[in-house]
Amino acid sequence: MTTYVHYGSDFYNPSLAFKAVNKEKSCKPAEKTGLWGTRESSNFDDGKIVYGWKQWCKDTKYRPETLKKSFRFRLADTANLLTIAKPEDLVPLPKTAPWQLKDMSALKDIPPGEFPTPEQLHEFYSPNPCYLDFEKLMEQGVDAIELRNNHLFSRYLREWNCDCLLVLDPAVIVSMMEESDYVLMQPMSPKGRK
């Protein structure tokens, strides 16, 4: 069973978890919807290395203080996990705006000693954001998306900075908190309030 880690919070509070909601012209769902995580292990099942959130934060020096707080979770056995490993995997998925995978073969066919045209360079280097329709994916039964090989997706899934998991429906989250952690989530009695 794969274990994931969410950084930035000490514990999972189900009452603060919301299904993913589309955000206009964004490759990510609306803020405070869905739940982001990364594999706890440093390798995928096939042995390939996971480039997770912790490593990305260390490499980029992005908000390293968030790494001090984390909680572990896994997905329910019944969860429908969609794995995206290559840009072609995006083609059949529902989107909120028209999108096409760019053909990169033009750069491969340049004869030795010649340079690409400005148009070819623009086609190769320009962003091509893919706005997935998270709500439609949930309607189709997808509970979570796991991105592998994130370096292949920098032009398409902008701001998906590492190999990660996006839980669309929090109903499939199985928290792996210690019993003592649940005490943090209990409401205080009227006598305990100040």
Image (cartoon, rainbow, N blue to C red):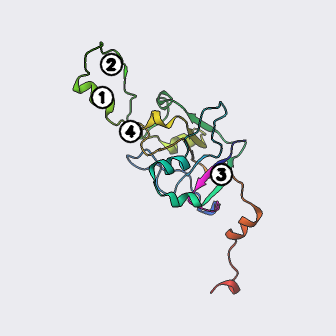
Please give the name of the residue rendered at 24% of the width and 26% of the height, measured from the top-left corner: 119
Contact, mark 3 vs mark 2 (Cβ under 8 Å): no
Residue at the spot of label 1? 123
Give the CA distance from mark 3 to mark 4.
Answer: 28 Å
Q: Secondary structure at mark 4?
A: loop
Q: Give coordinates of residue 9: x percent, y percent.
A: 59, 61
1 vs 4, front mark: 1
Amino acid carrying label 1: it is Glu
Residue labelled with disc 3: 171
Say if residue 139 shows up in the picture.
no
Mark 1 or mark 3: which comes first in sequence?
A: 1
Asked which secondary structure carries label 1, the reply is helix
Can you tell which quarter of the image residue 176 is in? bottom right
The stretch in magenta equals 5-13
Circles 2 and 1: CB distance less than 8 Å?
Answer: yes
The residue at which mark 4 appears reads as 129
Report the predominant secondary structure element of the magenta stretch.
Answer: loop
Residue 103 position in % (x across, y down)? 37, 23
Q: Amino acid at mark 3?
A: Ala
Q: Is residue 8 magenta?
A: yes
Mark 3 vs 2, N-terminal side: 2
State how far apart marks 1 and 4 are (Cα): 13 Å
- Tell me if residue 193 comes above or below residue 4 in the rendering: below
For the residues labelled 1 and 3, the Cα–Cα distance comes to 41 Å
Q: Earlier in the sequence, mark 2 or mark 1?
A: 2
Residue designated by label 2: 106
Query: In the picture provided, is 78 more to the left or to the right than 54?
Result: right
In this view, the residue farthest toward the right is 179
